[in-house]
Image: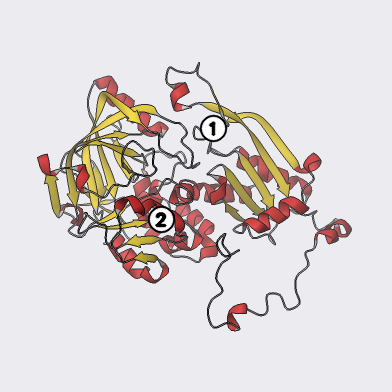
């Protein structure tokens, strides 16, 4: 059985490991300064718990989860989708239920749940939740933020159409909806939960085997018939009340902004908390720049990549940069004629993911993981009168403050900011195609003699320190 503990042990040398005791209120600020997966071995006042964040913060981290090279993440995700879902195996007992807290013991305040900003009204869990449709019996997975209202109550943000549709069915019946929040499982379970493209007759967790090559093992909860990963560190079981609501927010979203600022969301009533004997609390920091920007768009990179391939566009990579706040995508392509760059940009902007607001196409000689390289392409290869595409009144992302809400749509539309509309833009920052050789020659970059043939690391005793604001 694969577990988060085993995964962290295998890759500990690649992580930032904090062995000194840390105050829980310092976890967020320390995490935001790291550029790698970060592990806290000791959290003050929470003995026995470790805490981890940023399991997907960059391509190297994502590659560790997928078992591939850092440069092959998008093709590896494409291969996961090609393999498709595999049935899960339900075990009679599991490590995630080694310790059981019920009744007064089931106190959320015993867990190292992080308060993400100074103005958050509560500590928030940010791991995935599991639901089940009462009619079709189909399971569902989503990533809500759940604020701790009391020892056994949370306010839970319902952010996906599928989860809201399931909740609506329970509300029509005036029944409580079973829910389980899963914290600290093998990251492949988390990656599977990021898949949000339309799919029928299977659910996200069934991608676990396609990601890892190991069968997905689950166990039935103690409070209801939901199933959760057997290797999880912590599972919070309970029921979403059909009518009780509470304030959710202000708390930041993937755009790193307090948008929507605050709204009413359902109350989750906790009935039990189950744990491993040595639990690892998995945090997803909601401030810049962390997993909150990286995780939601991973499979969308692979989906866009495959669509461009199907269109005959020579695509090398697709990347949502952290600074793009989940609204911007970079397309590394090598167009053989002018129209292909336009097609690629329109394809990305019209993808099924409503986050898409800005797309930039660059050549293979531009490193899309280096902001300086992208800035260079924008500065030297773009004529705004020719290379800019603007689309009016596209679908907007509720977390984008520049999007215009449609309050007439529903009573809750203004507060939830759904639906909303916004303009979209595409930028063709590619060189002229090869058949325009004379013009293309003007865009050839100047490099030092022997560039790419010698390495600075071979001439220094210690690795060169990265340039930061403090060292500039």
Q: Vertically, is 3 above or below 427?
A: below
Name the residue carrying label 2: 31
Q: CA distance from mark 2 to mark 1?
A: 25 Å
- Callout 1 environment at 10 Å: few (<14), some (14 to 19), or many (20+)? some
- Where on the picture, by quarter, is residue 454? bottom right
> Split into 4 quadrants, where in the image is the C terminus?
bottom right
User: Foreground residue, 274 or 343?
Assistant: 274
Name the residue carrying label 1: 401
Q: Find residue 97 and name its label.
A: none
| Image side of residue 61 versus residue 403, left or right | left
Residue 465 can be seen, yes or no:
yes
Measured from the top left, where is residue 133 in percent x and y?
Answer: 30, 33
Measured from the top left, where is residue 285 in percent x and y?
Answer: 40, 49
Measured from the top left, where is residue 400 in percent x and y?
Answer: 53, 35
- Where on the picture, by quarter, is residue 363? bottom right
Which color scheme does this rendered protein use?
A: secondary structure
């Amino acid at each position: 059985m694969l577990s988060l503990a085993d995964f962290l042990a295998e890759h500990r040398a690649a992580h930032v490991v904090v062995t000194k005791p840390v105050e829980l209120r310092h976890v967020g600020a320390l995490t935001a300064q790291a550029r790698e997966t970060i592990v806290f071995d000791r959290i003050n006042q929470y003995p026995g718990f470790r805490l981890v964040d940023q399991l997907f913060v960059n391509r190297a981290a994502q590659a560790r989860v997928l078992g591939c090279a850092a440069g092959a993440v998008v093709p590896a995700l494409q291969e996961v989708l090609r393999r498709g879902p595999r049935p899960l195996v339900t075990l009679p007992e599991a490590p995630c239920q080694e310790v059981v807290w019920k009744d007064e013991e089931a106190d959320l305040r015993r867990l190292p749940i992080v308060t993400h900003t100074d103005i958050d009204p509560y500590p928030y869990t940010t791991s995935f939740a599991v639901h089940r449709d009462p009619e079709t019996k189909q399971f569902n997975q989503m990533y809500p933020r759940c604020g701790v209202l009391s020892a056994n109550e949370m306010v839970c943000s319902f952010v996906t159409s599928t989860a809201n549709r399931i909740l609506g069915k329970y509300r029509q019946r005036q029944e409580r909806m079973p829910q389980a929040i899963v914290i600290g499982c093998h990251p492949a379970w988390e990656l599977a939960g990021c898949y949000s493209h339309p799919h029928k007759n299977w659910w996200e967790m069934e991608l676990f085997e396609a990601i890892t090559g190991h069968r997905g093992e689950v166990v039935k909860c103690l409070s209801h018939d939901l199933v959760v990963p057997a290797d999880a560190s912590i599972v919070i079981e309970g029921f979403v009340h059909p009518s009780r609501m509470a304030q959710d927010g202000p708390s930041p979203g993937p755009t790193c902004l307090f948008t929507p600022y605050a709204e009413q969301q359902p109350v989750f009533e906790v009935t039990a908390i189950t744990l491993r004997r040595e639990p690892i609390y998995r945090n997803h920091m909601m401030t810049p720049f962390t997993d909150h920007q990286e995780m939601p768009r991973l499979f969308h990179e692979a989906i866009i990549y495959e669509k461009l391939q199907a269109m005959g566009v020579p695509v090398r990579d697709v990347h949502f940069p952290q600074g793009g706040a989940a609204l911007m995508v970079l397309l590394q392509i090598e167009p053989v004629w002018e129209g292909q760059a336009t097609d690629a940009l329109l394809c990305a902007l019209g993808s099924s993911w409503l986050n898409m607001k800005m797309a930039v196409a660059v050549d293979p000689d531009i490193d899309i993981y280096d902001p300086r390289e992208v800035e260079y392409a924008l500065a030297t290869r773009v004529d705004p009168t020719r290379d800019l595409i603007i689309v009016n009144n596209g679908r907007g992302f509720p977390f984008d403050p520049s999007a215009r809400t449609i309050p007439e749509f529903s009573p809750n539309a203004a507060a939830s900011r759904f639906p909303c509309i916004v303009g979209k833009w595409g930028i063709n920052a590619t060189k002229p195609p090869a058949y325009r050789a004379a013009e293309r020659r003007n865009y050839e970059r100047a490099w030092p003699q022997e560039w790419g043939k010698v390495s600075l690391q071979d001439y220094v005793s210690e690795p060169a320190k990265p340039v930061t604001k403090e060292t500039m």
